Image: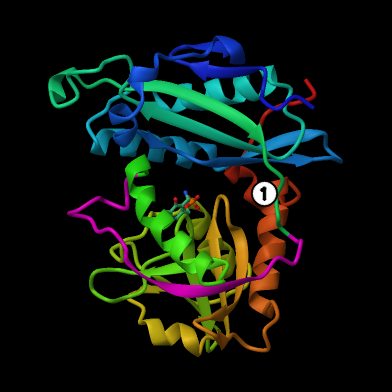
């Protein structure tokens, strides 16, 4: 298997991998202002079809991010959907795939501080990325000593590349301390999220998660899980401020996000969750989520874009 896809999308056309080069002086400052998305597509072996998960919502969020950092792109959400599907077809993607659209201020070593001149260049890459749903993966978490960025500092709502330094610092800290994953508190001392994933917990048959003003990215997976819990499990879902110590006595905790999918957390700050295994609500949500993303649940068809991989 080749180590890279044949094509990527770059500024209006498919470009062969080897031809997609920029001058070295374009990196650095242009990267700090770049916004991006992370999207998964799931391969359904039986149907020989690739389904992109909630592509419309991801591309809308890309447009929102680019608007918030004043780096406009002159393509619509519908264009972005079409471009992505066409790229996946061109690359012959027939396996679980990660799609990475990036909007950056390219080709200019000056002018980045003049908002009138800002215009985003668009790059989309696709790479094989297996899912870990159903593999039984479990993680041990630790509350990081770093604080989550906040809306009037570096807005977490924007998927800006620079924001991710915050999560990296937290991840490096807790990994060096022997844990798998970090959690972060916001400046108000309330639970915010993990680097790159939202946090949810089960207590007294309710699903609870920090609200959108808790310094989180408004996660599309989080929205999907809340819908599955409400509509398929008939479970009350509550979005509110969350104290750190609430997590210590939760029945179940998991992370959710495009990369994290559903990742059960079995220990936080050396407090064990339940019996240390994957809880029943987490398992059931993981099952429902898997059916939805893989294209086995007709009820969730509106969440999927079929690539028509076999056409
Ligand atoms: N928080 C952050 C900081 C993230 O980068 C991500 C991944 N995009 C998430 C949460 C989860 O969001 P989503 O479910 O939309 O991928």
> Residue at (78%, 20%) from the top-left corner?
311
> Residue at (59%, 85%) from the top-left corner?
273
Estimate how packed mark 1 is, as few (under 14), some (14 to 19) or many (20 or more) residues with alpha carbons within 10 Å: many
Judge whether residue 137 is colored magenta: yes
Tell me which corner region of the image, top left, top right, bottom left or bottom right, holds residue 129: top right
Residue range highlighted in magenta: 134-158
Judged by its main secondary structure, the magenta piece is loop
Tell me which corner region of the image, top left, top right, bottom left or bottom right, holds residue 178: bottom right
- Left or right? Give the position of 175 relative to 88: left
Residue 246 lies, with reference to residue 21, above or below; the image says below
Colouring convention used in this rendered image of the protein: rainbow
- Left or right? Give the position of 58 relative to 111: right
**Foreground residue among 181 and 237:** 181
Quadrant in which the N terminus is drawn: top right
- Left or right? Give the position of 142 relative to 169: right
> Residue at (53%, 65%) from the top-left corner?
175
**Foreground residue among 258 and 144:** 144
- Left or right? Give the position of 64 relative to 85: left
Q: Where residue 159 sits: x, y (%)?
A: 37, 44
Q: Where residue 194 sits: x, y (%)?
A: 45, 63
Residue situated furthest front in the rendering: 176
Residue picked out by circle 1: 293
Residue 61 in view, yes or no: yes
Residue 160 in view, yes or no: no
Judge whether residue 138 is colored magenta: yes
């Amino acid at each position: 298997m080749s180590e890279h896809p044949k094509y990527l999308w770059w500024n209006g056309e498919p470009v062969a991998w080897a031809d997609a080069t920029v001058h070295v002086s374009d990196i650095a400052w242009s990267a700090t202002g770049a916004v991006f998305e992370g999207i998964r597509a799931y391969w359904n072996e039986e149907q020989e079809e690739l389904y992109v998960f909630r592509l419309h919502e991801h591309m809308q969020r890309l447009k929102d991010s680019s608007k918030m950092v004043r780096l406009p792109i002159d393509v619509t959400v519908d264009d972005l959907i079409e471009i992505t599907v066409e790229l996946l077809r061109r690359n012959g993607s027939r396996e679980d795939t990660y799609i990475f659209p990036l909007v950056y201020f390219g080709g200019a070593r000056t002018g980045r501080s003049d908002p009138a001149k800002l215009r985003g260049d668009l790059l989309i890459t696709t790479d094989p990325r297996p899912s870990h749903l159903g593999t039984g993966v479990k993680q041990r978490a630790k509350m990081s000593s770093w604080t989550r960025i906040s809306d009037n500092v570096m807005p977490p709502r924007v998927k800006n590349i620079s924001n991710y330094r915050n999560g990296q610092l937290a991840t490096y800290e807790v990994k060096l301390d022997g844990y798998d994953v970090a959690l972060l508190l916001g400046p108000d001392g309330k639970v915010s999220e993990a680097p790159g994933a939202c946090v949810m917990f089960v207590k007294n048959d309710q699903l609870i998660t920090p609200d959108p003003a808790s310094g989180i990215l408004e996660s599309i997976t989080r929205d999907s899980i809340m819908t599955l819990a409400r509509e398929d499990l008939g479970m009350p879902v509550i979005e509110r401020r969350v104290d750190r110590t609430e997590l210590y006595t939760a029945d179940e905790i998991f992370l959710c996000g495009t990369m994290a999918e559903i990742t059960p957390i079995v220990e936080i700050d050396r407090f064990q969750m339940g019996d240390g295994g994957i809880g029943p609500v987490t398992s059931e949500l993981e099952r429902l989520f898997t059916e939805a993303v893989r294209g086995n649940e007709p009820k969730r068809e509106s969440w999927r874009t079929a690539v028509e991989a076999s056409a």
